[in-house]
Image (cartoon, helix red, strand yellow):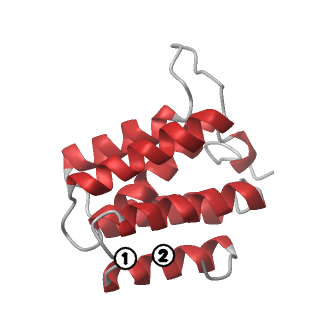
């Protein structure tokens, strides 16, 4: 452990991880510079059907930890964060703590990203590029 750092990577909370994922999923939806309601709906559905079902933990305020995905996505949308900045935030977190997600979770991350990209009809070039970068970052093969 190095002295002088704010917090060791192993101390990242579940809420921090879900916030990071919220930025990632926002970056997928925003990478073509247009977020449509279908993409937001796809995220909300994936969160409700998969993320909240798999993790029933709550924070100190009684908020389901996985809800931070939606909360952060909505915040990034409200603040008009650029897709590049949102992805950079996720990438930085992932590089700082590369083992924070197991194989099953990485697969769910990728499935969620693809569901968001496909929500508006088909995966466009910027979305395909971002998903390819995500696969590489997570060490996953093609969908």
Residue at the image point whose x is 57% and y is 57% from the top: 93
- Could you tell me if the residues under marks 2 and 1 are in contact, i.e. CB atoms within 8 Å? yes
Give me the residue at 44% from left, 62% from top: 115
Give the crowd class for mark 1: few <14, some 14-19, many >=20 residues within 10 Å: many
Extreme-top residue of the structure: 61
Q: Is residue 92 above or below residue 57?
A: below
Residue topped by disc 1: 127
What's the CA distance linking mark 2 and mark 1? 6 Å
User: Could one spot residue 128 in this view of the protein?
Assistant: yes
Left/right of residue 131 with respect to residue 82 in the rendered view:
right
Image coords of residue 120 (percent x, y)? 27, 66
Viewed as shown, does residue 118 lie left or right of 94? left
Instruction: Locate residue 37, reporting x and y percent.
Output: 22, 52
Residue 47: percent from left, percent from top: 49, 42
Give coordinates of residue 1: x percent, y percent.
81, 51
Please indicate whether residue 100 sits to the left or right of residue 42 in the image. right
Which of 97 and 37 lies nearest the eye of the viewer? 37
- Specify the quadrant that holds the C terminus: bottom right
Query: Which residue extends farthest front?
Result: 121
SS at badge 1: helix
- Residue 38 picture quarter: bottom left
Q: Which residue is mark 2?
A: 131
């Amino acid at each position: 452990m190095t002295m002088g750092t704010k917090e060791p990577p192993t101390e990242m909370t579940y809420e921090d991880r879900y916030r990071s994922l919220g930025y990632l999923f926002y970056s997928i939806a925003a990478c073509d510079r247009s977020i449509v309601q279908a993409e937001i709906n796809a995220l909300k559905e994936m969160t409700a059907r998969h993320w909240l079902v798999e993790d029933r933990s709550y924070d100190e305020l009684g908020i389901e930890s996985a809800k931070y995905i939606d909360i952060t996505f909505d915040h990034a949308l409200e603040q008009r964060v650029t897709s590049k900045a949102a992805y950079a935030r996720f990438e930085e977190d992932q590089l700082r703590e590369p083992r924070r997600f197991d194989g099953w979770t990485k697969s769910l991350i990728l499935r969620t990203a693809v569901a968001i990209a496909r929500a508006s009809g088909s995966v466009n070039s910027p979305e395909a590029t971002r998903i390819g970068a995500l696969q590489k970052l997570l060490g996953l093969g093609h969908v």
